[in-house]
Image (cartoon, coloured by chain):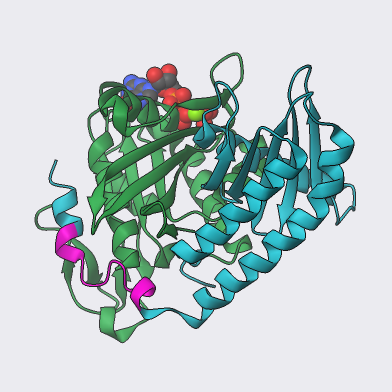
Chain colours: A cyan, B green
Amino acid sequence: MTAGAPSWTFTEDDFGAITGSMRRFLDDTNSMCAMLVDKSGQLVTTVGSAPGLDPTTFATLTAADFGANDQLARILGETDFTTLFHQGERESVFVADVARRLILVVIFDSRTSVGLVKLKLKPQVEELTALLDVAMSRSRLGVPQQEKLLHGAEQEIDDLFQW
Amino acid sequence: MSMINYASREINCKIVYYGPGLGGKTTNLEHVYGKVKPETRGKLISLATETERTLFFDFLPVDLGTIRGFKTRFHLYTVPGQVYYNASRKLILKNVDGIVFVGDSQTERMEANLESMQNLYDNMAEYGYDLTKMPFVVQYNKRDLPNAAPVADLQAALNPGWEVEEPAKCRVTPDPYHAGENLVEQIATGEWVERAPFFEAVAVNGDGVFDTLKAVSKLVLKALA
Ligand SMILES: Nc1nc2c(ncn2[C@@H]2O[C@H](COP(=O)(O)OP(=O)(O)OP(=O)(O)O)[C@@H](O)[C@H]2O)c(=O)[nH]1
Ligand SMILES: [Mg+2]
């Protein structure tokens, strides 16, 4: 057993590549907003916007929704239950698994079509998976500067809680 | 699983409040929500039943300050304490960085406390996480009630200590929060044991709520140091 889940890191380069890819996807599909969410509910990045949308809240609820559906799929003996679709009157949402670690959320309205978003979703997931593999393998190799972000920061951490 | 983002300069961590039904987990988050500056917290999301029992989880994001130029964002979750919600409870534990066990001090809730603690160990083990090696603190809540059990009894039942394996850790470590007590010590049998830090609380009026949060957050950040 481990002392909990390992931490992971995004460099500015990883982040730039991921965000750029998502922005292209948004333009190609004419969607409103795309978000990349960690399975624990933490927002990795968001591009575009939707009115009244609080990305942090949305990310948490999406991860919970996806997690619950994943369990439902397992109960049904399904293993590949990797996309969810929620259709609303004005806005709809696609939610897709990326490399079993992240979730891609796409919010779109009538300015595009379900068919188009769905069509472009698969190559987008593949592209993100490839970018993520790069980030993950670097994390595994351990970039010293990153691993050591808080190294020796015991005193600073203590000071942070002097309230 | 803490996530460090060099582009947005954020450290994100997940803390889960666990414990028996009606122990006061949601009340802890409500107090934090009410007390921190609005610009340092997000919305409090509660997925609850009509009778205000947690159905899936409560969620509150808070920024606890900046360290080395990185914003420390803590995502606080509570789980549903009621026994039959185990599937949801387990889901929320995924990728957790730190745990607060909120025990109910009332003597008649001792059984429920024990069951919940066992359930926590079991669910963590199913994910392959070892609770004894993680940031973990225990809160004894509802200290205001006349039927609250003595803290010593609660400690003996819920936080008796686990055996320390690494020889390097086998040295007396005082409890920074309770003078004269130790977190790591040798017991009569010669065995070295470690206990989780504990706090007394009255979550309804906020007593002990921030002490608990600070302690667990500090442990989470220190695990990255
Ligand atoms: N007397 C007293 N009551 C408390 C205290 N903390 C919480 N309560 C009350 O206990 C009840 C349950 O509290 P919650 O915070 O909803 O409990 P919970 O642990 O979230 O319960 P579940 O969601 O079912 O798991 C509420 O009526 C609270 O007001 C306390 O310190 N003292
Ligand atoms: Mg609750």
User: Residue B146: where, in percent of width, then height?
Assistant: 28, 23
Q: Quadrant of residue A87?
A: top right
Residue at 79% of width from left, 49% of height from top? Answer: A121
The residue lying furthest to the top in this view is B50
Residue at 52% of width from left, 58% of height from top? Answer: A16
Residue at 24% of width from left, 68% of height from top? Answer: B184
Judged left or right of residue B150, residue A115 is right
Judged left or right of residue A5, residue A94 is right
User: Residue A76: where, in percent of width, then height?
Assistant: 89, 47
Residue B135's place in the image compared with A133, above or below, is: above
Q: Quadrant of residue B218?
A: bottom left
Residue B167's place in the image compared with A162, above or below, is: below
Q: Is residue A41 visible?
A: yes
Judged left or right of residue A93, residue B141 is left
Q: Which residues are magenta?
A: A145-156
Pick the front one: B222 or B85: B222
User: Residue A79: where, in percent of width, then height?
Assistant: 86, 57
Pick the front one: B107 or B12: B12
Q: Quadrant of residue A154?
A: bottom left
Pick the front one: A109 or B65: A109
Magenta-span inclusion, residue B65? no
Q: Is residue B144 visible?
A: no
Residue at 23% of width from left, 59% of height from top? Answer: B68
Magenta-span inclusion, residue A149? yes
Judged left or right of residue B71, residue B51 is right
Residue B163's place in the image compared with A109, above or below, is: below
Q: Where ligand 1 lies, by quadrant?
A: top left
